[in-house]
Image (cartoon, rainbow, N blue to C red):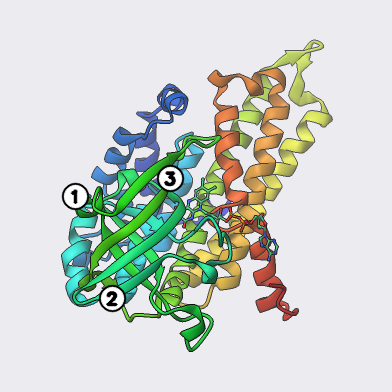
Amino acid sequence: MSAAQHESDEIAAIRQAVRALCEKFPGEYWRALDRERAYPTEFVEALTGAGFLAALIPEQYGGSGLSMGAAIAIMEEIQANGCNGAACHAQMYVMGTLLRHGSPEQKQKFLPSIARGELRLQAFGVTEPTSGTDTLNLRTTAVRDNDHYVVNGQKIWTSRVEHSDLMLLLARTTPREQAQKRTEGLSVFLVDMREARGKGLTIRPIRTMMNHATTEVFFDDLRVPAENLIGREGQGFHYILSGMNAERILIAAECIGDAKWFIGRASGYARERNVFGRPIGQNQGVQFPIARAYAQMRGAELMVHEAAGLYEAGRDCGAEANMAKLLAADASWAAADMCVQTHGGFGFAEEFDIERKFRETRLYQVAPISTNLILSYLAEHVLRLPRSY
Ligand SMILES: Cc1cc2nc3c(=O)[nH]c(=O)nc-3n(C[C@H](O)[C@H](O)[C@H](O)COP(=O)(O)OP(=O)(O)OC[C@H]3O[C@@H](n4cnc5c(N)ncnc54)[C@H](O)[C@@H]3O)c2cc1C
């Protein structure tokens, strides 16, 4: 029995509803978008309309108020049915920073519209070209000027920003040498891009190996109202960190969905493809990699459920969320490689969708956090080894 089979009737119904929605967006839909690197607007609108992207917004703000267990079921099903949740997954979790650290007025102003899908908050500007993984070294500054902050600098890999109304921005408000602690002096802002575009905000798309709507963003004296500062000035790094467990768990669930899709495709093909007068799946050389990928996926799936359970119980889940992301990303990548191999030449043919999903799932070894940094986290915080960076 898989971890998913222990779930409640409510979650089973959610899975069924997501599957039904995904059936309307078959491989041809994604292939056409992939060729043009175009955004899956209709798919995102359908998910929004069904309330799935508001899963984690409490009912008091008009959201679905669902559990993390339900949210991971949604993300997993999207991927397991051949669709690509990366186009909109951040709409589920970026609002968590606002929910946890925003003022009552900010929450009232933004969350109900986000829950209704009228406002999109699915862009997250943290990474910069010069600092990369070393977030505390970021250079974008926000300097207070009366009732505004003036923002200058650059972000990179800011995904979905062209398809978002709001962006969560991390910028330095106190010079590094003047900050009391290494982790202080950064602040989080909600940038309203409907007002900012052309007035100090420039977006430049980056074409990537998969269809991901990612960009570079330039800030040139962009004025952001001081009322858009979230929480206390200088505490932004802590606020961003507090949202990372949810992000890791949800993306790990996507990887599980991808792994299931690859394993399903590979098993189906291995049963039906006849070479040397018998199904290729009759050969152990073909069976074993599929069976291994399945076992690897199931192990990772348990960790995803463990992390989600701790998260729901309000307990510390840093190690489990990181391990879930690590194991699930490894499982999806191993399954992707196995699936190409099982299909032989046809694994490379566009119409089989395998090469597209293969390119898409490769990302999760690098983003939203790269594998090495998870290993460093475990080494330092769980195994108490010396800090390596
Ligand atoms: C398609 C895509 C979408 C993304 N979307 C977003 C987004 O929406 N918002 C956002 O803010 N960011 C986003 N990112 C950024 C992503 O989350 C990574 O954090 C970022 O790419 C890492 O920075 P870098 O590429 O400069 O790598 P670098 O920091 O230069 O690292 C390069 C390599 O070195 C390794 N490395 C670096 N330092 C160490 C160390 N101390 N120990 C061991 N290994 C180390 C890394 O693991 C990596 O493999 C996205 C990235 C991609 C590719």
Is residue 64 visible in the rendered image? The answer is no
Which residue corresponds to the image point at 31% horizontal and 35% vertical from the top-left? 41
Marks 2 and 1: which is nearer the front? 2
Q: Residues within 10 Å of mark 1 (few under 14, many from 20)?
A: few
367 vs 116, nearest the viewer: 367
Q: Disc 2 designates what residue?
A: 144
User: Ligand 1, what quadrant?
Assistant: bottom right
Between disc 1 and disc 3, whose residue precedes? 1
Residue identifier under label 3:
215
What crowding class fits label 3: few (fewer than 14 Cα within 10 Å), some (14-19), or many (20 or more)? many
* Residue type, numbered disc 2: Arg
Mark 1 CB lies closer than 8 A to ligand 1 = no
* Residue 73 position within the rendered picture, expressed as x and y whole percent measured from the top left: 44, 51
Residue 93 horizontal side relative to residue 230, left or right = right
Q: Amino acid at mark 1?
A: Glu
Residue nearer the viewer, 66 or 42: 42
Q: Position of residue 71 (x, y in %)?
A: 40, 56
Gap between marks 1 and 3 measured at Cα: 23 Å
Identify residue for label 1. Answer: 118
- Whether residue 305 appears in this view of the structure is yes
